[in-house]
Image: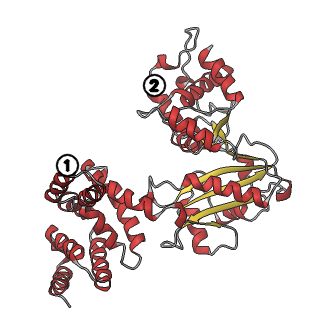
């Protein structure tokens, strides 16, 4: 065994003898030895020990590991400077490649080597979850997160993902995770889950990765219907009569849940809906409409932050719904005035509320429009649950996935900031916002 590796194991033995007193320098030594090692077998052992040491830390102490990565494992600036000088003297392909290699932070290679450990990928996903928490207190750690996202974007490329159908025969430990990870419409029991998986007019699909074969990354629940739905309650109601799948003409994507917080921001959800739509179309040629029934999660938060004048009607009359919404059970007997005010505000939110990148501030709208969907319909009281009322004043939205138009819609959204909308929604926008 090489002396450096002997030194590493001696360091690990000392660390295990006094874990509570582990100093930052211990992790720096471990990481440096892992980076300097050449042998694959020893690298696996070194990576395993480093990950073991990290996960043995109390949660409150883990941010200092990320601080170490940020401050001690960036690029070698002297090496970068020399590469810049070489490129400036001779700006050709080889010099550019050398500059690119030199500028890579050392922590990227460290993360790659930690991935050699058994279950390394899953442990790194969990590590990034800790990092995202630490970033809430220390924004400087964003440079470390950029390296995680860069590597994860390659490791979780669509080409590596496996689409699986989740049904009532799926192993119980995976079904338990579907219950736990459902983020849109809570699954309250095994019977509730069965009603979403077993009937002939229900489907569920999830992406898996070979390195995490028992962990769904993202899943979508689908209802097969004969009409465009405007409310979630009939889709989830127990005791409903299922239809034959061959009779369905509409596939409704009514819940999409990301499962791994450590993979937040890694884009594979956009592939999921289109892949599922294509697969369903092959299975059931009668399907001719692919549409979501989506929440409007940021609407009430946005509404409460607007000055009263922001929702003024075109004739200058008061048009502010919040006071009326403070009535108990306001949604059960809404006045015509309140309904019109909320509708006007919701249309404004969908079409005009933008972030600094000129994209919709609503995350669900941003996701579906970015995928090439069309803003199809706004549904009053689509979700009258406590969550639906508190987040979206009961509104739900249909986004249409026309498989022949998604790429064109995506280009219009990405390049022109265009919100592609149905004629119905265009008329509503003109009537409420431009009149």
- Would residue 129 be visible to someone looking at this image? no
From the viewer's perspective, is residue 193 above or below residue 320? below
Q: Where is residue 328 in the image (x, y as percent from the top left)?
A: 59, 32
Q: Tell me the element at label 1.
A: helix
Q: How many numbered discs sit on the rendered protein?
A: 2
Q: Tell me the element at label 2.
A: loop
From the viewer's perspective, is residue 331 above or below residue 363? above
341, 31: nearer the viewer: 31
Quarter that holds the N terminus: bottom left
**Residue shown at the point (67%, 50%) measured from the top left:** 253
- Would residue 220 be visible to someone looking at this image? yes
The dot on residue 88 is: 1
**Residue shown at the point (78%, 47%) measured from the top left:** 288
Labelled pair 2, 1 in contact (Cβ < 8 Å): no
Q: Distance between the residues labelled 2 and 1?
A: 52 Å
Quarter that holds the C terminus: top right
**Residue shown at the point (59%, 38%) measured from the top left:** 389
Closer to the chain start, of discs 2 and 1, is 1
Q: Where is residue 198 in the image (x, y as percent from the top left)?
A: 74, 65
Side of 21 where 193 appears, left or right: right
The dot on residue 281 is: none
Side of 16 where 262 appears, left or right: right
At label 1, counting other C-alpha atoms closer than 10 Å, the crowd grade (few under 14, some 14-19, many 20 or more) is few
Q: Where is residue 323 in the image (x, y as percent from the top left)?
A: 53, 23
Side of 349 where 33 appears, left or right: left
**Residue shown at the point (24%, 49%) measured from the top left:** 140
Q: Circle 2 is placed at which residue position?
A: 306
Side of 407 where 13 appears, left or right: left
146, 428: nearer the viewer: 146
At label 2, counting other C-alpha atoms closer than 10 Å, the crowd grade (few under 14, some 14-19, many 20 or more) is few
């Amino acid at each position: 065994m090489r002396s450096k590796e002997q030194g590493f194991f001696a360091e690990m033995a000392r660390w295990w003898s006094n874990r509570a007193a582990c100093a930052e320098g211990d992790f720096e030594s471990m990481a440096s030895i892992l980076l300097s090692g050449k042998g694959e077998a020893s690298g696996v052992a070194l990576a395993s020990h480093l990950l073991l040491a990290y996960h043995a830390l109390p949660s409150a102490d883990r941010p200092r590991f990320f601080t170490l990565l940020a401050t001690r494992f960036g690029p070698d600036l002297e090496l970068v400077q020399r590469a810049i000088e070489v490129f400036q003297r001779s700006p050709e392909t080889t010099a550019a490649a050398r500059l690119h290699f030199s500028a890579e932070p050392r922590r990227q290679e460290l993360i790659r080597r930690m991935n050699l450990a058994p279950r390394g990928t899953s442990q790194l996903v969990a590590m990034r979850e800790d990092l995202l928490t630490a970033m809430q207190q220390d924004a400087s750690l964003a440079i470390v997160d950029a390296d995680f996202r860069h590597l994860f974007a390659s490791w979780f490329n669509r080409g590596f993902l496996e689409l699986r159908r989740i049904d009532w025969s799926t192993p119980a430990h995976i079904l338990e995770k579907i219950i736990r990870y459902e983020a849109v419409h809570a699954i309250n029991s095994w019977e509730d889950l069965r009603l979403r998986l077993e009937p002939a007019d229900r489907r569920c699909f999830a992406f898996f990765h070979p390195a995490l074969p028992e962990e769904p990354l993202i899943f979508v629940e689908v209802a097969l219907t004969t009409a465009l739905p405007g409310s979630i309650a009939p889709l989830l109601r127990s005791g409903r009569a299922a239809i034959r799948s061959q009779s369905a003409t509409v596939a409704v994507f009514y819940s999409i849940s990301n499962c791994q917080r450590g993979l937040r921001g890694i884009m594979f959800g956009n592939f999921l809906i289109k892949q599922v739509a294509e697969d369903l179309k092959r299975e059931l040629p009668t399907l001719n409409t692919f549409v979501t029934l989506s929440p409007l999660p940021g609407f009430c938060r946005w509404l409460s932050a607007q000055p009263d004048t922001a929702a003024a009607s075109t004739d200058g009359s008061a048009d502010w719904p919040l006071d009326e919404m403070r009535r108990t059970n306001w949604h059960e007997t809404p006045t015509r005035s309140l309904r019109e005010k909320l509708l006007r505000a919701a249309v404004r939110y969908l079409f005009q509320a933008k972030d600094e990148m000129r994209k919709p501030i609503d995350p669900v709208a941003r996701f579906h429009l970015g995928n090439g969907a069309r803003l199809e319909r706004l549904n009053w009281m689509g979700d009258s649950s406590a969550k639906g009322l508190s987040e979206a004043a009961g509104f739900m939205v249909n986004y249409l996935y026309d498989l022949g138009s998604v790429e064109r819609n995506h280009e219009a959204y990405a390049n022109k900031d265009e919100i592609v909308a149905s004629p119905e929604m265009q008329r509503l926008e003109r009537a409420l916002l431009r009149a």
